[in-house]
């Protein structure tokens, strides 16, 4: 396959046309499949044909050939196990293994016995990187140009993984592997993530025999909403529960179990913890070792990390530290209170990162304790993109404010400094710390034009094969290269047809040849980058970059693609993108720009769309809804964890919620209906039989409206009438909330503001209990209702 793909790269790099490139790619892929089928023996069409008895069948067993029972599919001879670990929102200069200030003993150990890759690239955003990682195709090629929460109706942006781009898990599963996905799944369309399915794009439908994790971009680490396969996991009653530990426990349990049952079958274990994505939450004992470690600030951190990186050899000796990105403040311009708050936020983040590496270490050690463990490929990728600047210039205690377009102030955040890292806040450090985590590069997550958003550490260990412990590899690689490399190493033919669907070509290129040879030539010659208007193009050691918007700014206006400024770097000589050569090489820049447009046309990148938070509004974007045009919804007890995009769309409009309940003689308490949780939402519940409605306005204000008298025993109709004061198309306007019992008004309140765009992050609608985080701090989930609920009806107006 490798020579054929190289031929294709040569065609595109020289310019041909998008059409010619496609033809060349198709031809190359077809030829490679035939060649590999002959050499490896794995079929190019999956699934294999159904069993047919090949002997003679007579009238009875006495005159028939002996039976030949169909045998399970066997993996290729000597096929290795694969453990793929993908951390979240982590930067190049974050962990100690690559010069950072956060301890990473698991990475250290794997790097000491394996290889560190210093030019590995992602897409600058989570779901797109994960889609590319699973399929071996570019993110726009598999409809993952953005996260599902901002999907639009263009081919590269629907968030619906196409069937002609099968996942590595599905291919390995049909070639004899046991497969499991533990942790974050952010590749199921949000409108398909409810109990109604469809389930073909849940983890089990993407080739994984087992799934334990969450279907969202991030998750509360103390009160998560989790699924085991397709079943909601009950809320834990362990007071010390912590998500990353739980995920590691399930990864260890699964791998031990399946290798005990089927010791001769290899496994593919994909572990994707939510760390170090926001919220930055971790038990205090992990934070304490970092107390005072970051008091010198982000500028000093960058200098220190840069020096360590040179000592470790993960950047060249001649590399230069880039300047602080435009718009970020110098540490010494801050006052004492700002420094105290921001240093504390970084201490929390460091403890958070140290914890996830520790928990991944438990998984690695469990695998290494299994028989035959030396034949295991460990791939540890520290980040699906660079570190995140979404906490804003002043940091955040509720990242949902960012996604609703609101800034935060350090003065307000300082008031809760002693609670940060715990269950009360969805905190995120300031943007300048994210930039420091991406040392030595410019910019951060979301910025696809520069390496701060797209270059991540990768470590590969394979005790049975890699003998150069502690080696460094500097070939240019991309996320899409993982799949073809695994196929190459295992001896798998990329199927030309999978489950009856002809497959589009693998767009990545195997780097198996560099495992044994540090000086081997890199084969990935051309790679485009794009995210929300930020653009980049790599070709043979050159990188052209066009920055769009600062990632801490949720409002994107004034973009003009024809006036976007481009920069040009010779990254063979300038590892960090420190010297812009655009003015000196206008012809080279023009060639690179033309190549970007050609690659964009080939891979469904067009049309460019730079909009930001407004794309989070599903109704405005026209994303599908399982409810269609319905305006009345009736729910029953047991309806819980209904995702936002499958729940009634209540923002910026009037609505009523009516609950028919039965109160026992002893009284009742508990949640009747809730939508959202810690970072925004509402809840209708009884406390000592008194009806209470809470509206959580993005954790800034929690408005509570309570009936003066408790309900009598027996049946009652409770109603919340939410009268929105804005006109159609007006966002976040005030509202009047009226609470009624059996048709009579019992309480009323005014909401000066309402949530405009995103009600919550990863939490939806529940009836009869709260399966996620609490909407206020007066109760502890699940806060199950102790009476009876006949039904809950929501009517939109």
Image: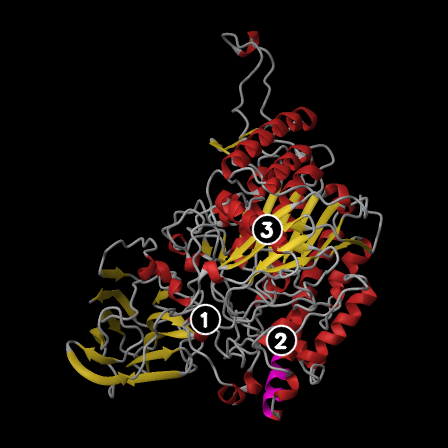
Q: Is residue 154 left or right of residue 582?
A: left
Residue behind mark 3: 592
Residue behind mark 2: 433
Cα separation between marks 1 and 3:
29 Å
Cα separation between marks 2 and 1:
18 Å
**Seen from this angle, which residue lies furthest bottom?**
336
Tag in front: 3 or 2: 3
The stretch of residues the image draws in magenta is: 337-345
Q: Which residue occupies the foreground of this view, 569 or 435? A: 569
Which picture quadrant has residue 445?
bottom right
- In this rendering, does residue 704 appear at all? yes
Whether the residues at callouts 1 and 3 have beta carbons within 8 Å, the answer is no
Which dot marks residue 125? Answer: none
Residue behind mark 1: 554
Image quarter hosting the C terminus: bottom left
Earlier-in-chain disc, 3 versus 2? 2
């Amino acid at each position: 396959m490798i020579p054929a793909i190289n031929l294709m790269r040569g065609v595109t790099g020289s310019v041909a046309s998008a059409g010619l490139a496609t033809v060349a790619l198709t031809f190359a892929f077809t030829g490679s499949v035939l060649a590999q089928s002959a050499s490896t023996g794995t079929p190019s069409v999956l699934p294999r044909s159904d069993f047919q008895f090949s002997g003679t069948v007579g009238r009875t067993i006495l005159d028939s050939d002996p039976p030949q029972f169909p045998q399970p599919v066997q993996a290729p001879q000597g096929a290795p196990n694969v453990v793929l670990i993908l951390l979240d929102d982590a930067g190049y200069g974050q962990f100690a293994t690559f010069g950072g200030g956060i301890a990473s003993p698991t990475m250290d150990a794997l790097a000491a016995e394996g290889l560190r890759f210093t030019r590995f690239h992602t897409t600058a955003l989570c779901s797109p990187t994960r889609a590319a990682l699973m399929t071996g195709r570019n993110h726009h090629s598999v409809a993952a140009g953005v996260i599902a929460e901002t999907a639009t109706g263009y081919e590269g942006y629907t968030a619906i993984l196409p069937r002609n781009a099968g996942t590595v898990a599905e291919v390995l599963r049909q070639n004899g592997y046991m497969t499991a996905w533990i942790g974050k799944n952010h590749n199921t369309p949000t409108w398909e993530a409810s109990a109604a399915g469809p389930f073909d794009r849940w983890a089990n439908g993407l080739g994984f025999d087992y799934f334990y994790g969450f279907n969202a971009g991030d998750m509360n680490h103390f009160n998560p909403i989790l699924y085991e396969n397709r079943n909601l996991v009950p809320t834990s009653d362990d007071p010390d529960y912590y998500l990353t530990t739980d995920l590691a426990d399930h990864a260890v349990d699964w791998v031990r179990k399946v290798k005990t049952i089927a010791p001769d079958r290899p496994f593919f274990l994909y572990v994707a913890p939510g760390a170090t994505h926001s919220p930055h939450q971790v038990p205090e004992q992990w934070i304490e070792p970092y107390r005072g470690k970051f008091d010198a600030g982000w500028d000093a951190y960058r200098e220190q990390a840069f020096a360590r990186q040179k000592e470790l050899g993960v950047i060249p000796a001649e590399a230069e530290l880039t300047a602080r990105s435009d718009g970020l403040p110098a540490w010494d311009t801050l006052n004492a209170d700002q420094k105290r708050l921001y240093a504390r936020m970084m201490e929390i983040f460091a403890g958070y990162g140290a914890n996830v590496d520790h928990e991944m270490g438990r998984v690695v050690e469990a695998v290494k304790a299994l028989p035959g463990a030396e034949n295991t490929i460990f791939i540890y990728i520290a980040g699906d993109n660079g570190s995140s600047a979404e906490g804003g210039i002043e940091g955040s205690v509720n990242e949902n404010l960012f996604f609703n377009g609101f800034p935060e102030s350090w003065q307000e955040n300082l008031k809760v400094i002693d609670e940060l890292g715990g269950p009360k806040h969805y905190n995120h450090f300031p943007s300048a710390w994210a930039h420091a985590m991406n040392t030595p590069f410019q910019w951060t997550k979301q910025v696809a034009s520069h390496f701060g958003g797209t270059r991540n550490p990768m470590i590969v260990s394979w005790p049975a094969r890699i003998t150069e412990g502690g080696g460094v590899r500097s070939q240019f690689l991309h996320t899409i290269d993982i799949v073809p490399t695994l196929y190459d190493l295992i001896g798998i033919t990329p199927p030309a047809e999978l489950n009856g669907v002809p497959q589009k070509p693998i767009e990545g290129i195997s780097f198996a040849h560099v495992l044994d040879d540090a000086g081997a030539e890199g084969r990935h010659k051309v790679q485009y980058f794009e995210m929300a208007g930020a653009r980049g193009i790599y070709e043979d050691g050159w990188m052209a970059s066009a920055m769009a918007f600062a990632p801490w700014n949720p409002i994107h206006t004034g973009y003009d693609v024809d006036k976007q400024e481009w920069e040009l770097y010779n990254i063979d000589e300038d590892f960090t993108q420190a010297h812009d050569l655009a003015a000196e090489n206008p012809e080279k820049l023009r060639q690179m720009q033309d190549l970007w447009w050609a690659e964009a046309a080939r891979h469904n990148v067009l049309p460019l769309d730079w909009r930001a938070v407004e794309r989070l509004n599903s109704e405005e974007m026209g994303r599908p809804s399982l409810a269609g045009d319905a305006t009345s919804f009736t729910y029953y007890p047991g309806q819980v964890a209904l995702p936002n995009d499958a729940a009634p769309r209540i923002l910026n409009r009037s609505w009523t919620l009516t609950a028919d309940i039965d109160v026992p003689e002893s009284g009742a308490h508990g949640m009747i209906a809730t939508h959202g949780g810690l970072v925004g939402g509402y809840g209708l519940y009884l406390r000592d039989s008194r009806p209470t409605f809470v509206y959580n306005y993005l954790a800034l204000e929690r408005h509570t409206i309570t009936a003066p008298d408790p309900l009598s025993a027996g049946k009652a109709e409770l109603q919340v009438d939410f009268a929105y004061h804005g006109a159609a198309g007006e966002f976040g306007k005030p509202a009047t909330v009226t609470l009624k019992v059996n048709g009579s008004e019992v309480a009323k309140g005014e909401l000066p503001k309402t949530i405009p765009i995103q009600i919550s992050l990863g939490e939806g609608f529940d009836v009869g209990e709260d399966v996620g985080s609490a909407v206020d701090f007066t109760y502890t989930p699940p806060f199950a209702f102790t009476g009876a609920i006949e039904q809950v009806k929501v009517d939109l107006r």
